[in-house]
Every structure is written in structure tokens, then in C-alpha cells.
Amino acid sequence: MIGISVDPPASSRDLWEKLGKKFPLLSDPGARVIRLYGVVHEGGNGEDISLDTTLFIDEHGIERWRHVSRTLPDLPSAAETLTHIRQTVPAQPATRPARGKTR
């Protein structure tokens, strides 16, 4: 999980710490990445900013789930996000370490 912000790294870091986020925050000052994902709010706060969005992208680069928040409190909780991830990822069978053959 990562966050992406168009804000300068220092101000993004301050906000991230204030919000108590524990995952990495990447800087996207030209809004290139957020445009690629279609989550740009053009002219928000006088400049292009990202919409508060949660995306789940699998190991193949396929978007499996998207939540675009209307307000900051509308962000999904960690539990809600995990539920959606579990619903989109097939369960992996439990594996046991291979046992050595005996003669």
C-alpha cells in the first residue's frame, strides 16, 4: 500500500504524520500518475490535485478494486480495504514444507 500526493514532499510528509499513516507516500508533483489512473481533481484548491482514492492493483498490474472518497472521512478503513482485497484475491491453499522421503 502506498499513498500518492501532488503536494511537495515536506508538506505531504507533515500531513501523513498528522494522520498517523504508516505506509509510504510518493510525490507526484506534475500529477502524472494520478492522471494515468483517472483520479485527478482538476482545479481543486486552485491547482490539480488527486481525489482521495483507494485502489487495489494486483501483482499483474490489473486494478481489482477502486473506492473514490467524497470526503476525507469517507476513506475506507483498513478492515474494509482488507475485506475487498480478500474478495478479489483467490484463496491460496495452505502449503506444508515438503517432507524428506524415507527408505
Image: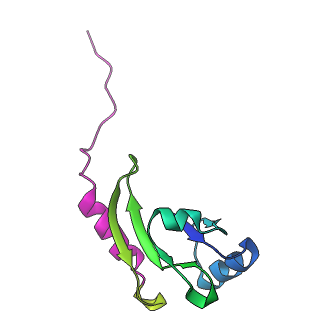
Q: How is the image coloured?
A: rainbow
- The answer to which of 5 and 100 lies nearer the viewer is 5
Q: What residue do we see at 63% from left, 78% from top?
A: 16
Q: Is residue 91 above or below residue 8?
A: above
Considering depth in this image, is 32 or 79 the residue closer to the camera?
A: 32
Q: Is residue 88 above or below residue 4?
A: above
Q: Quadrant of residue 26?
A: bottom right
* Residue visible at 59% across and 69% down in the picture: 31
Instruction: Count numbered badges in the picture.
Output: 0
Between 31 and 55, which is closer to the camera in this rendering? 31
Across and down, in percent, residue 42 comes to 53, 81
Asked whether, in this view, residue 48 is left or right of residue 67, the answer is: right
Residue 2 placement: quadrant = bottom right
Say whether residue 85 is magenta.
yes
Q: Is residue 71 toward the left or the right of residue 26 in the image?
A: left
Find the magenta span and give its range: 75-103
Main SS, magenta residues = loop
Residue 97 in the image, given as x and y percentages of width and height: 34, 32
Residue 62 versus residue 36 in the image, above or below: above
Above or below, 71 against 61 in this view is below
